[in-house]
Image (cartoon, grey):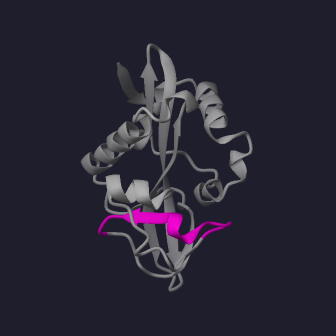
Amino acid sequence: MIEFLPLASIDAPAVEALLDHAFGTDRHLRTAYKVRGGGRAMPALSIAAAEHGALIGTIQCWPVTLTGDDGTAYPLVMIGPVAVEPARQRDGVGRMLMTHALHAAHVGGLDGAMMLIGDPEYYGRFFGFTAERTAGWRLPGPVERHRLLAKGEGVPASAGTLGPAAVGI
């Protein structure tokens, strides 16, 4: 049986090893890492999946900010990475982690403006994310525009730059 735990309760080197195994050791060069910056993941929304004591998946959520061209700061929750042990990637573990994180965001009142970089067919079909309001967003690195997804009534449709959240958010 899969157990879902706060990610903070898992040994950090085990989490890093899973992320390396799922995404490669060069993952820190990706645009998503630049968007998140050096901040901390949101503990209430960052979850681990374990089975028989072994870590099989993680999801992390991060506070980020879209700074509009007019100077307005829009706080957002960035979901990802969603990492699943490669041998378990077709078992629904990622979907269960997303469901747990989205539920925690809803309970905590943090689901009004969420975004991620991911497969639009998957995240749209199962979780309601779209690229409808992200066309004017600029990121600190390359991104396939159709993979820049968001959901929630607080997601701005304005042009701006996406980056790490300001301290204290």
Q: Picture coordinates of residue 101 (x, y %)?
A: 37, 43
Q: Quadrant of residue 14?
A: top right
Q: Nearer the viewer, residue 48 or 40?
A: 48
Q: Nearer the viewer, residue 73 or 58?
A: 58
Q: Quadrant of residue 76?
A: bottom left
Q: Picture coordinates of residue 61 (x, y %)?
A: 47, 48
> Which residues fall within the magenta stretch?
139-153
As for residue 151 lying within the magenta part, the answer is yes
Rendered residue at 64%/41% (across/down): 23
**Is 123 placed left or right of 25 in the picture?**
left
**Is 27 placed left or right of 100 in the picture?**
right
Asked if 156 appears above or below 48 in the picture, the reply is below
Asked if 98 appears above or below 72 in the picture, the reply is above
Location of the N terminus (image quadrant): top left
Q: Nearer the viewer, residue 84 or 108?
A: 84
As for residue 31 lying within the magenta part, the answer is no
**Is 48 placed left or right of 18 in the picture?**
left
Q: Picture coordinates of residue 164 (x, y %)?
A: 57, 60
Rendered residue at 50%/78% (across/down): 135
Asked if 106 appears above or below 2 in the picture, the reply is below
Rendered residue at 59%/28% (across/down): 12
Q: Picture coordinates of residue 121 (x, y %)?
A: 42, 59
Which residue is at the far left?
Answer: 107
Asked if 128 appears above or below 131 in the picture, the reply is above
Q: Nearer the viewer, residue 82 or 43?
A: 82
